Amino acid sequence: MKKNIFLFFMSCLALSVFIFDKDPFQKMLEQTVNYFEAKGGQIFIINTQTHQIKKEYKIGESAFSPLAFGKKSDCFRQTLLVNSKQIDTYSCTHIKKNPNQVETISFANLSSIGKNYEVWVVLNEPKPKKETFGFVTAPWTTLPLLRKIILSW
């Protein structure tokens, strides 16, 4: 009898962890925002056929606007290899009015690996870290998170 009660309790506990556990992308975003002490962050997963946002994750303040990018943006292109297929990733760092305030964005189109999605990762005002040599540009802040998301898919 005690064994049955114990097994029932453990299965309920396992089910509750499964049901109430956060989405892995939300966890990754939380960890990145906390690590960089950013004001906020977002992940967008966009269907490339319908151009609709399939899923959005958001933490804290984030005022992402693709229209904000212009003369004060530095952009980089990098290629990521996944299962011998290339994915081009793009990372942009937008400097706000104050040069110490930046918004970093990395994005990739996953059609080259057979997925009809684009993934965008945004961080609002990340802080410099010793591990990033004091840089707060997109290749040091949002691109590692984008890589984790792509590789976990």
Image (cartoon, rainbow, N blue to C red):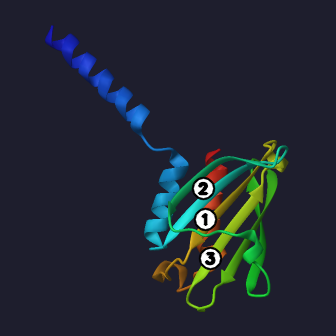
Nearer-N-terminus badge (3/2): 3
The C terminus, quarter of image: top right
Amino acid bearing label 3: Glu
Identify the mark at residue 144; answer none if there is no mark.
1
The N terminus, quarter of image: top left
Q: Secondary structure at mark 2?
A: helix
- Label 1 Cα neighbours within 10 Å, binned few <14 / some 14-19 / many ≥20: some
Tell me the distance, in whole angstroms, between the alpha carbons under discs 3 and 2. 20 Å
Vertical order, 101 against 31 (above or below): below
- In the picture of the structure, the residue carrying the numbered disc 3 is 103
- In the picture of the structure, the residue carrying the numbered disc 2 is 148
Measured from the top left, where is residue 152 in percent x and y? 61, 47
Q: Secondary structure at mark 1?
A: helix
Q: Secondary structure at mark 3?
A: strand
Vertical order, 113 against 12 (above or below): below
Question: Residue at image x 79%, y 87%?
Answer: 71
Do the CB atoms of the residues marked 2 and 1 lie less than 8 Å apart? yes
